[in-house]
Amino acid sequence: PTTRYYDWIISRQNIAPDGLMRPMLLVNGMFPGPLVEANTGDRIVVKVTNHLTVGTALHWHGMFQNGTNWMDGTTGITQCPIPAGGSFTYNFTVPTQWGTYWWHAHAGSQYVDGIVGPLIIHSPNEPHLEEYDEDVIVMMSDFYHTTTAPLLSYYLSEESDGTEPTPDNGLINGRNSFNCSNDALANFPTNTTNCVSNSPQSVFNFDAGKRYRLRLINTGAFAEFQFSIDQHNLTVIEADGTDLQPAQVQRIPIHIGQRYSAIVTANQAVDNYWVRAVMNTYCVGDNAALNLTTTAMVHYNGAATVDPQAPVSDSQDWGQPQYIGRCLDLSADMLKPWVAQDAPPADVTYVLNMSFQKLTKKHVSLGYVNSTSWVPLKNAATLNQAKRGVTNFAASQFVISMNQTQTIELIINNYDEGSHPFHLHGHQFWVVGGGQGSYLPGKSPLNTTNPVRRDTATLQTFGYTILRFVNDNPGMWAFHCHIDWHMQAGLLVQFLSHPEIVKTFKIPEDVKALCGAA
Ligand code: C2O
């Protein structure tokens, strides 16, 4: 094993990912940010220098952080922010996992403003290594033309009536084009004199006959994408770090925080083809304005450098319509883990009911899990409190404390018209059930025979999802909707795993110091 060192400076800069210049928060001036790449067993060391005027923190989405909970990078939970002008070094090992991950700021909505990048872990144990020739990262996200500050204050006001800000565009690997004359239609029209139409989209250069492993990552704020490449099938081999039995599909629904690896073979005529990422209107309830197709291009080397001939509007009927209308993840029969592992029987079951309600004086719509709407602690972290033996957390913190190593079952009911990609830090869970309506015991049989193990699963519109995970990673772990607006509106709970062990944690001094002298 080796140590992978990274030296990062986070700063605010004006860039134009789709032609429209706007302020963004960037790592080393890059968007998307730098690739972190390591082998299983390696140590990853990232020195972060914060040149912003506000605090920040970086989360390594999907990393188990077993024994290093304080490196999870979640403000208000595992650390206080790295202060403006300050620096902090993340340092953790990756002993037992590989696959496709990502990193992003976990402080306010900062990742939506640009602090985001890929994290790839390789292993000689990967079963599909001989089945492709090259690795290709494909990050897709929705995109706003304004910074998150005004969007968030609009969303968390009476004025929005709970309707999320609608994205202005979508990006593939941080690029797209935009027709600047459309900007007046946006929620917050920007200054279009800073806009250049027809900015270049991403291009993937293929050699005829080669096989490419696309590592798809949805790094967005709001939208689920339906990903496809015209005329090419996709063979799915990995979901959220779990190797799969290969399954061939035409398109992949991917919600925020999720990752898939799909092998595509350059077996079509030497030409140009659209890569399409279509935002799925059905996932977002009444936010019907959302209906954007983001494109990039597959260019076969040797073809003329021109746009594909197929109209961009052609993609809507291209295969698997059943996933679109209800906003579902790929079905269980397409996501069979390569190394079979049945879900263990549940020892403890928690029922989490999530909804949006206007319970506050100002009639602002907030997200609730059971009766709690999360608000991040200021200048404090629940991990540090748990370390000091605190058991009665602030009313805004819904902390579920779990003492023994046992299998936890979560039944999550969605009393909302939107879908919600729920992400668990520090673990993978088995997805053992799901359906429409709220769950009643015996309602539908659970699938415990080698169900997919992942870290982010979509809770369908007015539906339920049943997850299981083993409580074997002591620490304070967030479980939240990865739609950024919904996390900011409070859709987050915390699992305190093994509080007695957490009390014995030796949290490094530099981590504790971020929360001040206390
Ligand atoms: Cu992608 Cu709480 O994280």
Image (tube, grey):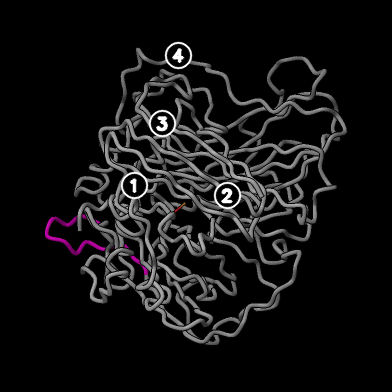
Secondary element at tag 1: loop
Secondary element at tag 2: strand
| Residue located at (21% from left, 69% from top) | 395
Q: Which mark is residue 9?
A: 3
The amino acid type found where label 2 is placed reads: Arg
The amino acid type found where label 1 is placed reads: Ala
| Residue located at (52% from left, 22% from top) | 177
Q: Which mark is residue 107?
A: 1
Closer to the N terminus: mark 2 or mark 4? 2
* Residue 366 lies in the magenta stretch: no
Q: CA distance from mark 2 to mark 4?
A: 42 Å
Residue 460, visible in the rendered structure: no
Please state which of the two labelled residues, at mark 2 or mark 3, is closer to the viewer: 2
| Residue located at (35% from left, 17% from top) | 192
The amino acid type found where label 4 is placed reads: Val
Closer to the N terminus: mark 3 or mark 1? 3
The amino acid type found where label 3 is placed reads: Ile
| Residue located at (37% from left, 45% from top) | 57
Q: CA distance from mark 2 to mark 3?
A: 20 Å
Residue where numbered disc 4 is placed: 196
Q: Which residues are magenta?
A: 354-365
Residue where numbered disc 2 is placed: 43
Closer to the N terminus: mark 1 or mark 2? 2
Secondary element at tag 4: loop
Q: Which quarter of the picture shows residue 325?
A: bottom right
